[in-house]
């Protein structure tokens, strides 16, 4: 891929599709929508509004980090707290695929409202090739695939969508980001789910359960990022396990189970498990069980992709 030619073409395409109108870009915190933000800024200047919908399902400090890293390159990001909408919509749902669908519907409803309020006629999106492939293959529903699954966003939500990265895989997106001078903090961002921590909670998504998995993800990232993996993460299981030995406890107590995952990959289509030093794994276990007392078991997932996927839902 000729990165500079790609950038030139996409800037032209964005200019053509948006015309004299205003466009809106929903930043998710990941590399993809960050690259789109910079491309759109180059194409449209102040005629692109970057909005960060805080759905309450983000990793620790994510909204603040995004705002400050984009401020450094002169791009303004509006943060809107919409977390109640998501937790209300997700209440009671345990099925992974249904949670993804609920997330997607809520996301578009909330975003649709934001687009209408802003007067934008066009929505920019950071959809990439694996999102499309996996949605088409029925492996999972990525939240940002609309036309591929037969939804006309203009009819349904009242706006056109532009997806400049749709032909690229992850490492190509990173190359484009590098060439665009993306801030280092954004550029190093690990892949993260569109539906956020919804995907890291097996079973019902509640504020309490998301808080547990958020804290576990922060610990895992802190301890494993020095190994520079492609991705590392923590997942909260739905089941509980017997609480650590407490001789005084009456009857049996149950605590949460956290799975730790750390993988190496080039494009997320296949992945190998990182051989994390045992001492590091023990440290992660120790930190999670002491800093999050409701967690009583920590397991390390050693399954590559295939046969597994990287995430759990
Ligand atoms: P899986 O779990 O399918 O994930 O092996 C492959 C890669 O894609 C990321 N992923 C997502 N990224 N929206 C995204 O932007 C999503 O809904 C989504 N689901 C999975 C995942 O973290 C991994 O890097």
Image: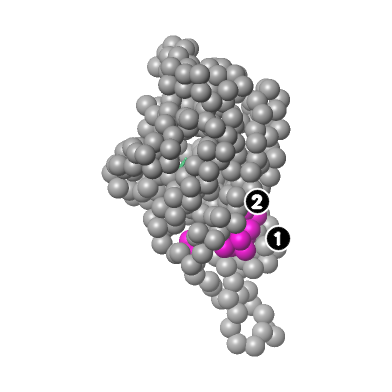
| Cβ of mark 2 under 8 A from ligand 1 | no
Q: Which mark is residue 178?
A: none
**Is residue 36 placed above or below 96 in the rendered structure?**
above
Magenta extent: 202-221
x and y percentages locating residue 300 in the rendered image:
52, 56
x and y percentages locating residue 67 in the rendered image:
68, 34
**Tally of numbered discs:** 2
Residue 215 is covered by the magenta coloring: yes
Q: Residue at x 70, y 60 (%)?
A: 291
Label 1, on which residue? 291
**Is residue 241 placed above or below 223 in the rendered structure?**
below
Sequence-first disc among 1 and 2? 2
Measured in 3D between alpha carbons, the distance from the residue under mark 1 to the one under mark 2, in whole angstroms, is 9 Å
Label 2, on which residue? 219
Q: Residue at x 61, y 68 (%)?
A: 296
Is 299 in front, or is 251? 251
Q: Quadrant of residue 225?
A: top right
Q: Residue at x 56, y 55 (%)?
A: 85
Q: Quadrant of ligand 1?
A: top left
Q: Residue at x 60, y 87 (%)?
A: 251
Q: Judge the density around disc 2: few (<14), some (14-19), many (≥20) Cα neighbours within 10 Å.
A: some
Q: Secondary structure at mark 2?
A: helix
């Amino acid at each position: 891929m000729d990165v500079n030619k790609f950038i030139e073409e996409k800037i032209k395409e964005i200019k053509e599709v948006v015309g004299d109108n205003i466009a809106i870009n929903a930043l998710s915190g990941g590399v993809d929508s960050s690259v789109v933000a910079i491309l759109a800024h180059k194409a449209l200047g102040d005629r692109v509004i970057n909005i960060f919908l805080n759905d309450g399902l983000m990793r620790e400090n994510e909204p603040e980090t995004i705002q400050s890293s984009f401020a450094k390159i002169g791009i303004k990001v509006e943060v809107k707290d919409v977390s109640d909408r998501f937790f209300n919509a997700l209440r009671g749902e345990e099925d992974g695929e249904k949670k993804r669908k609920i997330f997607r519907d809520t996301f578009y409803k909330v975003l649709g409202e934001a687009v209408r309020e802003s007067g934008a006629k066009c929505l920019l999106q950071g959809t990439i090739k694996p999102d499309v492939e996996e949605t088409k293959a029925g492996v999972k529903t990525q939240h940002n695939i609309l036309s591929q699954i037969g939804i006309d966003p203009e009819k349904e939500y009242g706006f056109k969508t532009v997806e400049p990265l749709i032909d690229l895989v992850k490492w190509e997106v990173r190359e484009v980001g590098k060439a665009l001078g993306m801030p280092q903090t954004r550029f190093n961002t690990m892949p993260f789910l569109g539906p956020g921590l919804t995907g890291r909670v097996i079973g019902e998504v509640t504020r309490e359960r998301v808080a547990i998995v958020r804290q576990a993800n922060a610990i895992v990232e802190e301890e494993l990022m020095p190994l520079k993996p492609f991705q590392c993460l923590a997942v909260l299981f739905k089941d509980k396990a017997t609480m650590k030995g407490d001789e005084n406890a009456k009857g049996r107590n149950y605590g949460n189970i956290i799975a730790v995952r750390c993988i190496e990959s080039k494009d997320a289509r296949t992945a190998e498990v990182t051989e994390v030093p045992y001492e590091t794994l023990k440290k992660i276990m120790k930190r999670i069980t002491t800093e999050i007392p409701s967690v009583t078991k920590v397991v390390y997932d050693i399954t590559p992709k295939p046969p597994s996927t990287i995430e759990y839902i």
